[in-house]
Image: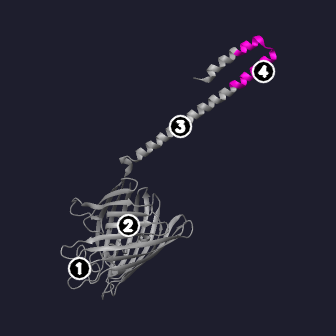
Amino acid sequence: MNKKVILLPLLALLSQAIWASEAPKEIDLLRQQIKLLTERLDKLENQVKDKNSTQVVTKSTSNQAVGNQLVKKSLADRLSFKADFRERFESIDQQGKVTRDRNRVRLRAALSMQVDKDLSFTLGTATGGDDPVSTNQTFDDAFSSKDIRLDLAYFDYKLSDAYNITGGKMKNPLYKPGKNSAFWDSDLNPEGLALKFNNGLLQGSLVGFSIEERKSAGDSYLLGGQVLQAFELSENAKITVGVGYYDYSNLQGSEALFDAKPRGNSLDANGNYTNDYNIIETFIEYENNIMGKPFSIYGNYFQNTAAKALDTAYTFGFKYGKVKGLGTWDIGVAYLDIEADSVVGLFNDSDFAGGNTDSKGLSLKAGYGIHQYMALGLTYIMSEFGQSQLTQTDYNRLQLDLQLKFQ
């Protein structure tokens, strides 16, 4: 019950009694005291109201926070989807062959689920056949239906703030300076396990990939890893340096991988690999922001320590700008020199020199955004392969792309 409601009538009765029996001065003094007491009661009542109101707001805010947590745990909030589509016109001019023109399409889509705060799972599909380094599908065969296959299926588990383990058919976890494909084609999604780490000073990956299972011979695996460190030079500039080592098992004396094509690697008279592949990698990349656009310049070097000759590869290049929305653009140039047995021919860039090692040349690229989610791309490759042979073969390739990305 309101104390003010009870107290005021009592004070009124008391003042009437005093009015009848006391002198005017004492009455005035009492009235002043009653006024001060009333004002004080009003003040105390307002303080109580303010406190109750604050408690209601705090409780409401707390309930809202709990509600938000519940919403974040809903299925819709734990799922994310992204896809990209590319239509390409391609012209291939290889010395000694008729120029080949074709239209190709690529569609990739992936759905990811955040199972809990530490565990996620990704499932992805893509066009193309079973080629490990291409998801392109050629427009031919009289409008026939095109293949869509499993492209990604992997989990990622956060062991701690510094360590993550990934398993399945995954995006390549290894760092590629300048995103160059001299060692790993951009479409290649390896299969196995990867331990990724970043302790704030060093970062990198340890990998164990399964390559070939054989019924009557030893299986082929890739065991290796990569360590890199970034040095901040200024607010926008940094240099990243790194080393890697990759040990392929049971390749020497085995048939060439996938379709038995050497792709520039040395084979013996029986069509088997002449060498094993134990590859050392070093790289450096400088990144900065010039005139409001990202700029990078990089170099990459590889040596196959298991080969006695034709064992080195290197690439260097630069990229300026980034296509990200309407009116944005980028340009890039890369030079590649890949000796025959420096890397495994199946896994390197499938566009450069027709996917062959024992090659060298230039790759020129440019892109321009024509919409928030659409861009045009141009690639021109001037290369030749057969460097270790008596005669070399010129190989030039033009690609015009229309690309869409959405999520």
Which residue type carries mark 2? Leu
Q: Is residue 64 magenta?
A: no
**Mark 3 or mark 2, earlier in chain:** 3
Please tell me in which quadrant of the rendered image residue 214 appears.
Answer: bottom left
Reply above or below: 269 against 76: below
Q: Amino acid at mark 4?
A: Leu
In-front residue for pair 282/247 = 247
- Label 2 secondary element: strand
Labelled pair 2, 1 in contact (Cβ < 8 Å): no
Which residue has dot 3 on it? 57
Which label was assigned to residue 195?
A: 2
Tell me which residue sits at (26%, 76%) in the image: 98
In the picture as drawn, the residue positioned furthest to the front comes out as 21
Judge the density around disc 2: few (<14), some (14-19), many (≥20) Cα neighbours within 10 Å: some
Question: Which is more N-terminal, label 3 or label 1?
Answer: 3
Tell me the CA gap for discs 1 and 3.
73 Å
Q: Residue sitting at 43 percent across and 61 percent down?
A: 160
Whole-angstrom CA distance, mark 2 to mark 1, is 29 Å
Task: Tell me if I can see residue 172 in this picture.
Answer: no
Residue designated by label 4: 29
Viewer-proximal residue among 3 and 39: 3
Q: Which residues are magenta?
A: 14-38
Disc 4 from disc 3: Cα separation: 43 Å
Question: What residue sits right under mark 1 in the picture?
Answer: 254
Q: Amino acid at mark 3?
A: Val
Mark identifier at residue 277? none
Asked if residue 28 is among those painted magenta in the image, a careful observer would answer: yes
Image coordinates for residue 150, horizontal then vertical, percent: 27, 61
